[in-house]
Image: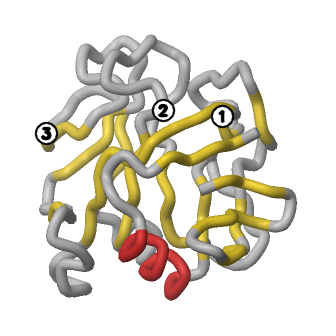
Amino acid sequence: MRLTPLGLRFAGRLWPCSIGRGGLTRDKREGDGATPRGTHHITGLLYRPDRMARPTPWAEPILPGDLWSDAPSDPAYNSLVRAPCAASHEVLRRPDPLYDLVLLTDWNWPEATPGRGSAIFLHRWRRPGYPTEGCLAFRPDHLRAIAALAAPGTRLVVP
């Protein structure tokens, strides 16, 4: 996978995508809305089992109470946590379809540096061109195809 100005090049195709509202950065910070430059890897695949069948054998279900810690002071910063969670977090099982299918990256993981940014996912876009909080976002059918073609360890280059 390689991000280009026209989209993500992967598996012989160009997949249109959206990036963070803060553009691309080499100095990622929590809450800056930027997509971090560098070489990242796919580390997991999450899906909503109440909304779709398991997309690949290695996909894990998003369960009620699944959250992602985005609090730099939390010992579980930038990882999956369970409710109740007093620290700041993102709800993974959202009422909208944004996180129905999520490819996880190794940005600032597994040893998270507080404040360097959390939750850089590949997920569904709200609409074409609508920026993310730092993730890469795709058309739903494209995201499903990418998830089917990717595997744990797939390299993601953001130049």
Residue 99 in sight from this viewpoint: yes
Left or right position of 96 against 79: right
- Tag nearer the camera, 3 or 1: 1
Q: Residue farthest to the front?
A: 12
Q: Reading the chain from its start, which is encountered first: label 2 or label 1? A: 1
At 50% across and 46% down in the image, what residue appears? 155
Q: Reading the chain from its start, which is encountered first: label 3 or label 1? A: 1
Q: Circle 1: is it few (<14), some (14-19), or many (20+) Cα within 10 Å?
A: many
Q: Nearer the viewer, residue 105 or 33?
A: 105
Q: Considering the numbered disc 3 on the image, is that residue within a helix, a strand or a loop? A: loop
Give residue 78's mark: none
Q: Are marks 3 and 1 in contact (CB under 8 Å)?
A: no
Left or right position of 92 against 116: left
Residue type, mark 1 in image: Pro
Q: Which residue is mark 1?
A: 36
Q: Nearer the viewer, residue 106 or 73?
A: 106
Q: Which residue is mark 3?
A: 84
Give residue 107's mark: 2
Residue 17 percent coordinates (x, y): 69, 68
Q: Are marks 2 and 1 in contact (CB under 8 Å)?
A: yes
Residue type, mark 2 in image: Trp
Looking at the image, residue 15 lies above or below residue 69? below
Residue type, mark 3 in image: Pro
